[in-house]
């Protein structure tokens, strides 16, 4: 596998405006509190409203939604190996009881293998019962890193050195024939994740539809005068095709239209109720944009709070409730729209937690953890073997599935893209989907 160094581009301050810089840095779409240099580095604009492009047979009607569980979700208390006594030996107070009568017991997934779900993941359990979700156990990578930032970079770049562009940014770079403004990706949040950043492709990021706007009043000085002229006259004299000013005018006006379109879409009542949680609000926003038939291929949501070093039981249970309920509501809304067959949802965390609970009633940084896929196109059920709880790597689980094999399956079979080129190496793709996908 070939590696390339990750380099950052120079700062905006003091740099004259150019079309190339504009494409590299994107446009100013953010909350009113965001500063121009910060947001220009995080966003890009014109791709949102562009015409769909299908290069090399890449389908434009398929959508990927990523849900990132930030902080390192405790996989052992999410997908619970209740049939293994070593689980309860390692977690005398945190262990969740086997399925049965009474509250707080695991939800049955696979009785023969002794595998269950956290009791608060009723939403995810109902998706599995409906045949439109899968659980992949023991996902990780060689020589695991227990740093939040480094491990997240590894997951987002699909490289064990964590360097270079994001794997989904490379997906766009490899499927748009060099077009700088293809239909692209949107992240809900102040900062766009590295996963979405390519050489050409730059994501759009915003925290909420109400704050999604074109900040014409806060432009860099080199952009201010032509933008003001656009607002006054709606056009500029001497803006010939291909000129810097015409490029600015077109993209600025696209920004205003995109802002209005997203806020209008999100203002409509959803077709199914969503929970009043942060992830619920993010997925409601994404579902509204899908319903509005936007050309965006990849959406990204983030749920935080999973770094449970102390007093884990209650807080982790609340997170499980929020996750399961939000995923169920999202799928209900997509089904009501008739878009459920177009949307694949992937849920991951940067690592799991250690097998043995700590003295503070929590768990420390670990390694392998489960991933979830949701959608009617997936092979439903529990897949791969659960890692051993006694054959450990310095107290941590040994991974049984390389996460890049999951990416390879998604790229090749769902997005119909060249997985080897995008992942910069060959990984045996996981069989994730039903026949005919």
Image: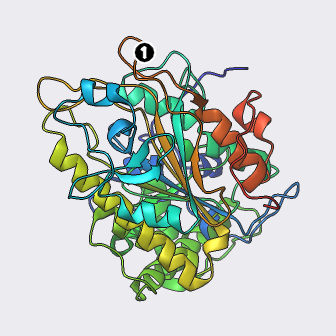
Residue hosting label 1? 392
Q: Is residue 258 visible?
A: no
Q: Residue at x 43, y 80 (%)?
A: 266
The outermost residue toward the top is: 394
Quadrant in which residue 96 is drawn:
top left
Is 79 above or below relative to 255? Answer: above
**Viewed as shown, does residue 271 lie left or right of 321?**
right
Q: Toward which corner of the image does residue 292 lie, by quadrant?
A: bottom right
Query: Residue 272, how many percent across, how many down?
Result: 42, 83
- How many numbered marks appear? 1
Q: Quadrant of the C terminus?
A: bottom right
Q: How is the image coloured?
A: rainbow
Image spot of residue 124 (x, y percent): 43, 61
Residue closer to the observer: 190 or 128? 128
Q: x, y percentage for residue 427?
A: 73, 30
Q: Quadrant of the N terminus?
A: top right
Residue 33, above or below 309: below
Of 327 and 355, the residue lying toward us: 355
Whether residue 227 is situated above or below residue 335 in the rendered picture: above
**Residue appearing at x 29%, y 58% in the figure:** 120
Residue at far right of view: 56
Q: At numbered mark 1, what does the secondary structure look like: helix, strand or loop?
A: loop
Q: Position of residue 200 (x, y in %)?
A: 67, 46
Residue at 79% in and 53% down:
416
């Amino acid at each position: 596998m070939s590696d390339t160094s990750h380099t950052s581009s120079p700062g905006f301050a003091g740099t004259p405006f150019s079309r190339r810089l504009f494409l590299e840095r994107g446009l100013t779409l953010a909350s009113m509190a965001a500063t121009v240099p910060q947001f220009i580095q995080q966003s890009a604009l014109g791709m949102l409203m562009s015409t769909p492009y299908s290069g090399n047979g890449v389908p434009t009607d398929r959508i990927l939604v990523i849900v990132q569980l930030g902080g390192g979700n405790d996989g052992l208390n999410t997908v619970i190996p209740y049939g293994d006594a070593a689980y309860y030996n390692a977690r005398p107070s945190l262990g969740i009881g086997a399925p049965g009568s009474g509250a707080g017991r695991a939800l049955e997934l696979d009785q023969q293998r002794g595998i269950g779900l956290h009791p608060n993941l009723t939403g995810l359990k109902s998706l599995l019962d409906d045949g439109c979700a899968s659980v992949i156990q023991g996902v990780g990578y060689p020589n695991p890193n227990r740093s939040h930032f480094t491990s997240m970079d590894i997951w987002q770049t699909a490289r064990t050195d964590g360097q270079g562009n994001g794997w989904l940014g490379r997906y766009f770079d490899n499927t748009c024939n060099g077009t700088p403004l293809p239909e692209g990706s949107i992240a809900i949040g102040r900062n766009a994740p590295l996963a979405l950043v390519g050489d050409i492709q730059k994501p759009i990021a915003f925290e909420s539809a109400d704050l999604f706007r074109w900040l014409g009043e806060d432009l860099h000085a080199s952009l201010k005068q032509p933008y003001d002229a656009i607002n006054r006259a709606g056009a500029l004299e001497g803006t010939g095709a291909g000129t810097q000013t015409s490029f600015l005018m077109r993209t600025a006006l696209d920004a205003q239209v995109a802002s209005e379109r997203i806020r209008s879409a999100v203002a409509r009542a959803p077709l199914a109720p969503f929970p009043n949680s942060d992830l619920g609000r993010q997925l409601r926003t994404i579902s509204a944009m899908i319903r509005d038939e936007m050309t965006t291929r990849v959406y990204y949501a983030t749920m935080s709070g999973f770094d449970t070093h102390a007093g884990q039981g209650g807080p982790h249970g609340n997170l499980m409730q929020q996750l399961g309920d939000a995923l169920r509501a999202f799928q209900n809304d997509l089904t009501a729209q008739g878009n459920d067959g177009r949307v694949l949802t992937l849920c991951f965390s940067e690592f799991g937690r250690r097998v043995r609970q700590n003295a503070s009633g929590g768990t420390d940084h670990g390694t392998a953890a489960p991933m979830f896929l949701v959608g009617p196109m997936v092979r439903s059920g529990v897949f791969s073997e659960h890692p051993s709880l006694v054959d450990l790597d310095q107290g941590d689980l040994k991974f049984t599935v390389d996460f890049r094999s999951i990416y390879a399956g998604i790229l090749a079979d769902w997005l119909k893209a060249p997985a080897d080129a995008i992942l910069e190496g060959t990984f045996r793709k996981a069989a994730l989907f039903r026949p005919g996908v």
